[in-house]
Image (cartoon, grey):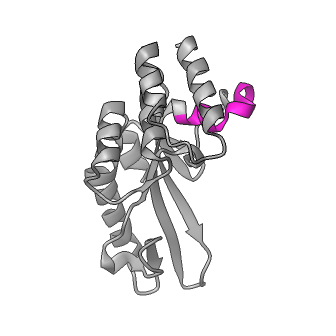
Amino acid sequence: MGKVAEESGMVGDGPAFRLTSSRGDCALVEFVDMRLDRESEVFSVRASIVPSSAWGWSQRRNWERARQQNPTSSSALIRWAVKPPAAYARDFGPLDPSWTYGGPVDPDASGVALASILGEETIPTMKRLLDREELLAEFLDPSFDFHRDRPIGWARTLLRVDDASPEELEELLGQVETDYPVADEFAAWARMRASRS
């Protein structure tokens, strides 16, 4: 992964690699180890997109401290599993497809397969989705399987809050789903953030 990441401009950060746009939006690839048996290594690979606005919203109560830290996938707008080919998969069901090597699975071959998928599919997708217009289009009309971490109205607002005129922002806030306990707080936060942009 290291070589693929470096060639793509990603920076390592513990079990994660990140790519950050000029506006602070972040794409992450994270590796999660699973301790299951002694004969093989099992891990999942997860990708996520964290716009700086989504990080700001989720960290609003600790913003002075959080703004000095790297965004994490806990604030992702979308996230997805990097799925292994069958030869390198450990089957735990469709929700968390896991990679494996060791035992009967050749570690080098598994590594080559992972590097290939990251370099040819995952990282190009992440780079494309660091463009907020592309991310919103994908959010509204998915071309692959991913998990949305916000409802559509909230996502529209988060992706436009830094650029919207006051009139556009009010129109966006009129589309925000209000059946959430913090909907009023979200609207107030968005107006405050927009006023500072």
Residue 80, given in percent of the width and then of the height, sits at: 42, 57
Identify the magenta region: 54-65
Q: Is residue 182 left or right of residue 26?
A: right
Image coords of residue 67 (percent x, y): 65, 27
67 relative position to 173: left or right: right
Q: Is residue 123 visible?
A: yes
Picture coordinates of residue 11 (x, y %)? 49, 39
Query: Is 164 on the left or on the right of 182, as rendered?
Result: left
* Number of marks in picture: 0
Is 65 above or below relative to 50? above
Please say whether residue 21 is visible from this viewpoint: no
- Please name whichever residue, 180 or 39, is drawn nearer the observer in this view of the structure: 180
Front position in the image: 20 or 113: 20
Is residue 98 found left or right of 115 in the rendered image? Answer: right
Residue that appears at 43% across and 82% down: 91
Occupied quadrant, residue 190: top right
Q: Main secondary structure of the magenta part?
A: helix
Residue 74, x across and y down, in percent = 59, 48
137 or 122, which is in the foreground?
Answer: 137
* Residue drawn at point x = 36 percent, y = 62 percent: 114
Q: Residue at x 37, y 76 (%)?
A: 88
- The residue drawn where x is 45% and y is 75% is 100
The verdict on residue 49 being magenta is no
Observer-nearest of 50 and 86: 50
Whether 12 is drawn above or below 69: the answer is below
